Image (cartoon, rainbow, N blue to C red):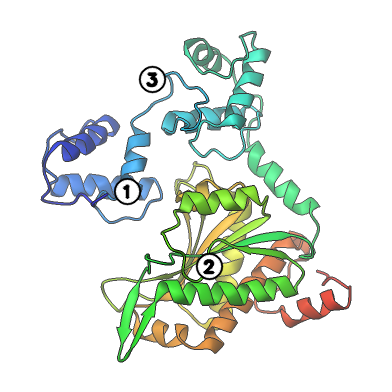
């Protein structure tokens, strides 16, 4: 869709403003995208972990469309092939999780797992276990207290499953996602006679990472080849990782900005960015390890880790992180990114972070201390590296 921005007017703007009014009654309705609307959109984007730009692109529109629903405002059921999506679904998932029911990740999508968990709840409170959330289920949910207090069972399950998988990389499955590709080149920067693209550099980094992790004994899959014929949406990339039952997903991107002063590396994990909101604790730890290893080994500016609700992070059923490895629009970062030695250092940092992720927290090692060449040698000798 064409982004809707300041100065636009018409039915689409009126719909956007009506949703913003529903979320915050102090924002007036209307059909003109004015400065006040832009500020409201920025606040919404910041709150939901979206890219903050003050205009409504496809990502922001889908989030706005989902945000219009409140728990109880419609009947929820498992619809095939187009499941119901909305904030009401996420609110139900969060409440069921807090009560101890396993809905998986609270992703705002009313799928099979959510319907099954609701059916279990309905059975226990004496309702027909049809997996349909209507007035009776809403009344029962409001009437009952929590079964579990002081934690989020899904993240505890995720952390425990990770711990039980052992400290070795051998036999584990990782999906590497080189961002963009094909017609979608991402950030493009001409540099004299050369033309650097985010798509090409991301694929080079992904290919190097594939070789390193395969050498360490992991089963590695890429979400795309060097030149796919069409744009691959993030939902399809997430579905591939889910279908492969991957243990981890690493998405590689390179950033860009309108001013060349913006530089540095940032790493993202699933979460809504609020202090009491959902977050994947395992992915948050992985993001922190990746960020620290890259900063220590490359010298890139530390732009920290951040929680986002992007589809690739929200819809994957395994810990997933997205790395924005420098700014192609920043002269210093660009000089580094086009250097193959720098890209090798970056890949080594990610490999070290993944290995540290599988070490028990009490047996972790200092940042920058793992020699990733030992991983390949240990696998070749049949002796997986020890924490």
Q: Give residue 276's position: percent from left, percent from top.
A: 49, 41
Q: Are marks 2 and 3 in contact (CB under 8 Å)?
A: no
> 349 above or below 321?
below
Q: Disc 2 vs disc 3: which is toward the camera?
A: 2
Picture quadrant of residue 112: top right
- Please tell me whether mark 3 sits on a helix, a strand or a loop: loop
Q: Nearer the viewer, residue 168 or 170?
A: 170
Residue 106's disc number: none
Residue 225's disc number: 2
The residue indicated by pointer 3 is 73
> 132 above or below 10?
above
Q: Give residue 39's position: percent from left, percent from top.
A: 22, 49
How crowded pointer 1 is (Cα within 10 Å; few <14, some 14-19, many 20+) is rated as few
The residue indicated by pointer 1 is 58
Q: Give residue 245's position: percent from left, percent from top.
A: 68, 50
How crowded pointer 3 is (Cα within 10 Å; few <14, some 14-19, many 20+) is rated as few
How crowded pointer 2 is (Cα within 10 Å; few <14, some 14-19, many 20+) is rated as few
Q: Nearer the viewer, residue 255 or 282?
A: 255
Q: Disc 1 vs disc 3: which is toward the camera?
A: 1
- Please tell me whether mark 1 sits on a helix, a strand or a loop: helix
Sequence-wise first label, 2 or 3: 3
> 133 above or below 21?
above
- The C terminus appears in which quarter of the rendering? bottom right
């Amino acid at each position: 869709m064409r982004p809707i921005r300041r100065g636009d007017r018409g039915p689409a703007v009126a719909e956007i403003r009506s949703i913003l009014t529903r979320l915050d009654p102090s924002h007036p309705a209307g059909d003109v995208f004015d400065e006040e609307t832009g500020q409201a959109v920025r606040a919404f984007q910041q709150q939901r972990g979206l890219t903050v730009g003050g205009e409504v692109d496809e990502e922001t529109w889908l989030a706005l469309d989902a945000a219009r629903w409140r728990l109880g405002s419609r009947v929820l059921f498992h619809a095939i092939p187009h499941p119901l999506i909305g904030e009401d679904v996420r609110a139900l998932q969060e409440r069921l999780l807090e009560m101890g029911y396993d809905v998986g990740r609270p992703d705002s999508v009313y799928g099979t797992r959510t319907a099954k968990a609701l059916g279990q709840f309905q059975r226990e409170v004496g309702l027909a276990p049809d997996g349909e959330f209507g007035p009776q289920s809403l009344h029962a949910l409001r009437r009952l207290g929590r079964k579990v207090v002081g934690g989020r069972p899904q993240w505890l399950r995720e952390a425990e499953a990770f711990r039980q998988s052992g400290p070795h990389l051998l036999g584990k499955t990782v999906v590497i996602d080189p961002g963009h590709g094909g017609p979608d080149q991402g950030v493009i920067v001409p540099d004299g006679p050369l033309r650097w693209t985010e798509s090409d550099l991301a694929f080079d980094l992904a290919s190097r990472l594939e070789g390193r992790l395969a050498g360490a004994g992991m089963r590695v899959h890429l979400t795309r080849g060097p030149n796919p014929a069409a744009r691959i949406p993030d939902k399809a990339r997430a579905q591939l990782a889910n279908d492969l039952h991957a243990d981890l997903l690493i998405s590689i991107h390179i950033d860009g900005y309108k001013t060349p002063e913006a530089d540095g590396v940032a790493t993202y994990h699933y979460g809504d960015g609020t202090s009491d909101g959902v977050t994947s604790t395992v992915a948050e730890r992985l993001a922190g390890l990746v960020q620290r290893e890259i900063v220590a080994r490359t010298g890139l500016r530390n732009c920290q880790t951040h929680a986002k609700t992007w589809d690739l992070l929200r819809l994957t059923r395994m810990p997933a992180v997205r790395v924005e490895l420098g700014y192609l629009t920043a002269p210093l970062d660009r000089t580094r990114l086009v250097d193959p030695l720098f890209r090798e250092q970056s890949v080594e940092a990610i490999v070290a972070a993944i290995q540290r992720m599988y070490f028990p927290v009490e047996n972790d090692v200092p940042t920058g201390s793992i020699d990733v060449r030992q991983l390949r040698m240990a696998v070749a000798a049949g002796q997986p590296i020890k924490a």
